[in-house]
Amino acid sequence: MWFVKIKLMQNIKPFLYIGILVLALGVFLRIFSSFFILSLFFIIAGALMKITYIFAIYKRGEYKPGSELLLLGIGLSVFFTGVYFKYHFLPFHHAYLLATGGIFKMVFIFMFIQKTRKSATKVLIQP
């Protein structure tokens, strides 16, 4: 399986960056083209690559999940609720939900980066 091969990789950071680029390409295609299926494939592939990166560094012991995963769950729930209500009537604009979900996701990313950097410096300091 593809995620087993990742375990053998020494440096997994490029996998994260490629996932971010693939995800961004999918969003770009979704916004500026009519290739809905292709853009959906890129978005899902990029998200799976990022999730695989998180699982891989967790397995290595470089990341210990905490309360930031709750923020990610809330952010994704609010974001996808905004996507769902895009074509339904709401007493307010769906962009408020999208923005709030995006803010929660950005806070998750900030906390995730802080945690992984903190654990990386601990690994470097230990003999």
Image (cartoon, rainbow, N blue to C red):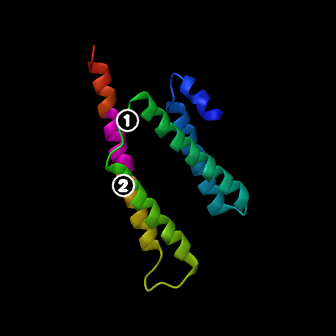
Q: Residue tagged by mark 2?
A: 70
Magenta residues?
108-117
The image quarter in which residue 31 lies: bottom right
Amino acid on which disc 1 is placed: Tyr
Label 1: element kind: loop
Tell me, yes or no, whether the highlighted magenta stretch contains residue 111.
Answer: yes
Q: Quadrant of residue 66?
A: top left
Q: Where residue 1 appears, x then y in whole percent?
A: 66, 33
The answer to whether residue 26 is magenta is: no
Identify the mark at residue 92; answer none if there is no mark: none
User: Position of 83 compared to 127: left or right?
Assistant: right
The amino acid beneath tag 2 is Leu
Question: Which residue in the protein does label 1 denote?
Answer: 63
Crowding near the residue tagged with mark 1, few <14, some 14–19, many ≥20 C-alpha atoms within 10 Å: many
| Magenta segment main secondary structure | helix
Question: Could you say which quadrant of the image residue 78 lies in?
Answer: bottom left
- In the foreground, 15 or 1: 1
